[in-house]
Image: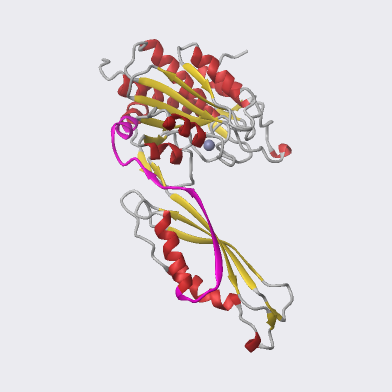
Amino acid sequence: MTSHSPTLELAMELIRRPSVTPEDFGCQELMIERLQALGFSIERLRFEDTDNFWARRGTDGPLLCFAGHTDVVPPGPLDKWDSPPFEPSIREGYLYGRGAADMKGSLAAMVVAVERFVKHHPDHQGSIAFLITSDEEGPFINGTVRVVDTLEARQEKITWCIVGEPSSSHKVGDIIKNGRRGSLSGHLKVKGIQGHVAYPEQVSNPIHRLAPALAELANTEWDQGNAFFPPTSFQVSNIHAGTGATNVVPGEVELHFNFRYSTELDADTLQHRVHQCLDQHGLEYSLDWTRNGQPFLTAEGELVQAAQASIQAVTGYATELSTAGGTSDGRFIAPTGAQVVELGPVNATIHKLNECTKVEELELLTDIYENILARLLAPSRN
Ligand SMILES: [Zn+2]
């Protein structure tokens, strides 16, 4: 048997547990065991079908929290994997397996970083916490959002939060996410009057009626973004109308669209502007909205500074701040007033076949997390 580093060993142990959302498959107990041994007090928070836990070491502020998820997305067709997705395999310096990058590698790095840090600084300042869920990849109803509600209800405040999502692009730490765009979806139905195409005076064509309004929505400049966000974007994902017959004007056209929006705007304003446009065009319609997440931004502060300095110290290169990409659980934590950054492995293979992460980058990530802990909770060390 070859001996692996503690981070690699733990990452492999986690990958062996096939924790497809919302199943946790014992991943959290494995982490809990390790954290308990370090003096963390553990609170298991199971909501419906979802396991979560909150672990805290220390009672004082400031509170540095590591956040993440033990669940993974389904592996897809097993015969398309070069090695079984739930049997960790190391080939040419890479660790393969579902969750290697998203995000069992980061969970292992967090635990080992904290183990090392506590060993060197048993009387560190403030507190360290873990906020771990098994429903990040799923409907996000019984996960982080409910743990945050529990903390808020008793006024337990996170000062700094590191989310271990795979934020990096080419090499670990080259990019950290210090915010995310908001996401707002709409389901629009425009009504018309169905009839024969040969009798236009007897029909009201909902496609024709929608077209000019849609052109206006597609061409609107919603904002210009700002230093941290690209301009807000409007995209139609589905449009449907028609009976299939070529001589019938349909009675309705249906449209799904989505906004990814910056901190220059909020959901209320966007909704209002869309309704204004549809009303100006005199449409008869129904419109259902889904708010998937508000934008958040940690523009500056101790956490961003510590993360940047730690990445520089460990890897020798500078990191770039970004707000691009999809949503993450950071959106639930940031509104409590916490500074939030996402810092984790390279995201090139996440959710794909043959998901992998570079073994040496798991070690670098462990070093970076430990370095951040030291900067924020043991600043007098020399
Ligand atoms: Zn993830």
Magenta stretch: includes residue 290: yes
Q: From the viewer's perspective, is residue 32 above or below residue 160? A: above
Where is residue 311? Give x, y as percent: 36, 30
Question: Residue 95 appears at what percent x and percent y?
Answer: 57, 28
| Residue 217 visible from this viewpoint | yes
Colour approach in the figure: secondary structure
Rendered-image quadrant of the N terminus: top right
Q: Is residue 275 above or below residue 313?
A: below
Choose between 81 and 378: the one closer to the eye.
Answer: 378
Q: Nearer the viewer, residue 53 or 171?
A: 53
Looking at the image, which residue sits at the far front? 153
> What is the tally of numbered marks visible in this picture?
0
Residue lying at 56% horizontally and 65% vertically, measured from the top left: 286
Task: Out of 296 and 341, give the one closest to the viewer.
Answer: 296
Q: Is residue 168 visible?
A: no
Corner quadrant of residue 298: top left
Magenta run includes residue 12: no
Q: Which percent across, then down, holds residue 278? A: 48, 71
Q: Which residues are magenta?
A: 280-308
Give above or below for 117 relative to 80. Answer: above
Q: Quadrant of the C terminus?
A: top left
Residue drawn at the location 63% of the way across and 39% of the way down: 353
Q: Which sits in the foreground, 317 or 329?
A: 329
Judge whether 371 appears above or below 81 on screen: above
The answer to whether 339 appears left or right of 96 in the picture is left
Q: Is residue 362 left or right of residue 381?
A: right
Counting from the top left corner in percent of width and height, residue 205 is at: 61, 79
